[in-house]
Amino acid sequence: MSRAERLLALVQALRRRRRPVSGAELAGELEVSLRTIYRDIQTLIAQGAPIDGEAGVGYVLKPGFMLPPLMFTDEEIEALVLGGRMVARRADDRLAFAAENALAKIAAVLPSDLSESMEATGLIVGFSRPEQPDGVDLSTLRQAIRNETKIAFAYVNEQGVPSRRVVWPMALAFFDRVRVLSAWCELRGDYRSFRTDRIADAVDLGQRYPRRRRVLLKEWREREDNHLATAAPATHSAVT
């Protein structure tokens, strides 16, 4: 690993953490000596990186720091291209268009050799679309998720029973043959998942729901983990 690559890796290691990290932990991750970490930290600070901390206490990178040049390893480029192509093939039209634009913007600012690597990658995404068309504009759901606002819609469950729901949307999952909205359902007073092909007449109510989405997600994931740990291997979370 060159020194430039090591400095970039160090910035990335700091960026992934929200709390101070010790020099010893960084040295172990980058497989270098503790002395090298101390020296590289001072180099980054001298170059303008907003790093707080000191030897023996730990270091933290302040939010918002960006490195001017875009530098990626071969595997990072493959990950970006594969992820972008998966979104372009399997997401709704607006998100697919955004993915293609994002890849084009990244390619435009990369050095020529890395840009060529993006074009020449051998990773291919198989074509796959949901079996049933969505009954809702997914951009409406994504916006409500970002803004933490309530959504009202009509829903028909697996048994064909219709209902009206008001939910607090948290996440949108893209599976091979179906898309699923995960949310807190006011009707059921609990977390529920909704297939988007069974949703109709969705309206963003513009009302902030009373709890933060990250709190809901944390609680929902903990419940899902507990369910998976105790349920039989063949069981799955219900879509209602």
Image (spheres, grey):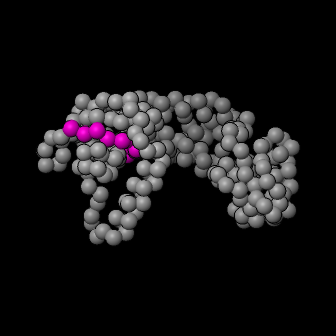
Is 138 left, or right, of 8 in this rendering? left
Question: Of residues 117 and 134, which is closer to you in this image?
Answer: 134
Q: Decide: is 108 above or below 30.
A: above
Task: Residue at 66% x, 31% y: name it.
Answer: 109
Question: Of residues 23 and 27, which is closer to you in this image?
Answer: 23
Residue 160 at x, y = what percent?
13, 44
Q: For the view shown, which residue lies furthest in the left direction?
A: 160
Is 49 left, or right, of 162 in this rendering? right
Task: Residue at 70% x, 62% y: name it.
Answer: 29
Q: For the view shown, which residue lies furthest in the front direction?
A: 210
Identify the image quadrant of the N terminus. Answer: bottom right
42 in magenta: no
Is 10 left, or right, of 76 in this rendering? right
Residue 30 at least partly seen: no
Task: Residue at 28% x, 31% y: name it.
Answer: 202
Taken as a whole, is the magenta stretch helix, strand or loop? strand
How many numbered callouts?
A: 0
Question: Of residues 170 and 186, which is closer to you in this image?
Answer: 186
Q: Decide: is 21 above or below 103.
A: below
Q: Within the image, what quadrant is residue 65 found in?
A: top right
Residue 70 at x, y = what percent?
68, 38
Residue 34 at x, y = what percent?
81, 64
Highlighted magenta segment, given as a residue range: 164-173
